[in-house]
Amino acid sequence: MSNDRGRLIVISGPTASGKTTLWRRLVTYPTVDFSVSATTRSPRKNEVDGKDYHFLSQDAFDALVAKAAFLEYATVHGRSYGTLRSDVHKSIEAGQDILLEIDVQGQKQLKESGIPMLSLFVMPPSLDVLRDRLRRRGTESEEEMNGRLAIVEEEMKWAQEYDHVVVNDDLEEMIQGVIALLGLEVKA
Ligand code: 5GP
């Protein structure tokens, strides 16, 4: 990248919208870092502490809040999640883009703070498609799944607050569209 400073790139979208597949692909570009959030939820199977999230106790999380260590933080599905300020600044100063996969509350906080950012909202083609994807993923209990679906419609109302809305009709097409939008350079 020719930029001196990296960009803060925010990706949000309903659960199972394809945003995880998207960010995993974007961070394969050497100019893009991933912001590892802190959370108080338990790790899922295959999740690695320090790589997917920093898994913290509520006390440890609250201590970071008290120290103003978070650029933004929110309660999502009853658990705390936050973006570490220091990680974001480190990447941006080093000229690296930094990708935040955060919820709509987090995007709102960042937007209100006036920090320069580029925000993308990944939209599933429909709620039915989303429900299907979630069932197939099978990582949540039925109760958790219903809870998540209940807030999807709420989240979707926020889409217009983002710089770009990308519809995930076709996953690969959507990913290629975002790569072009961000002007990411072909890997060596
Ligand atoms: P999950 O528990 O499924 O990994 O994530 C649940 C939700 O929390 C997702 O909508 C995700 O975008 C959001 N999330 C993850 N990390 C952060 C964060 O640091 N800040 C905020 N505001 N939301 C986050």
Image (cartoon, rainbow, N blue to C red):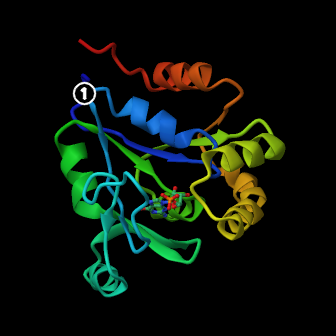
Asked if residue 17 is positioned above or below residue 142 in the image, the reply reads above
In the figure, is residue 82 to the left or right of 49? right
Q: Position of residue 3 (x, y in %)?
A: 26, 28
Q: Please identify the quarter of the rendering in which residue 1 is found.
A: top left
Asked if residue 141 is positioned above or below residue 31 in the image, the reply reads below
**Residue at image x 38%, y 21%?**
184
The residue nearer to you, when weighing 131 against 166, is: 131
**Residue at image x 37%, y 84%?**
58
**Residue at image x 24%, y 22%?**
2
Judge: label 1 CB < 8 Å from ligand 1. no
In the figure, is residue 171 to the left or right of 150? left
The residue nearer to you, when weighing 174 against 54, is: 54
In the figure, is residue 130 to the left or right of 77? right
The residue nearer to you, when weighing 178 against 114, is: 178
Q: Position of residue 24 (x, y in %)?
A: 41, 36
Q: Amino acid at mark 1?
A: Pro
Q: Please identify the quarter of the rendering in which residue 136 is found.
A: top right
Q: Position of residue 99 (x, y in %)?
A: 38, 44
Which residue corresponds to mark 1? 30
Callout 1: SS: loop
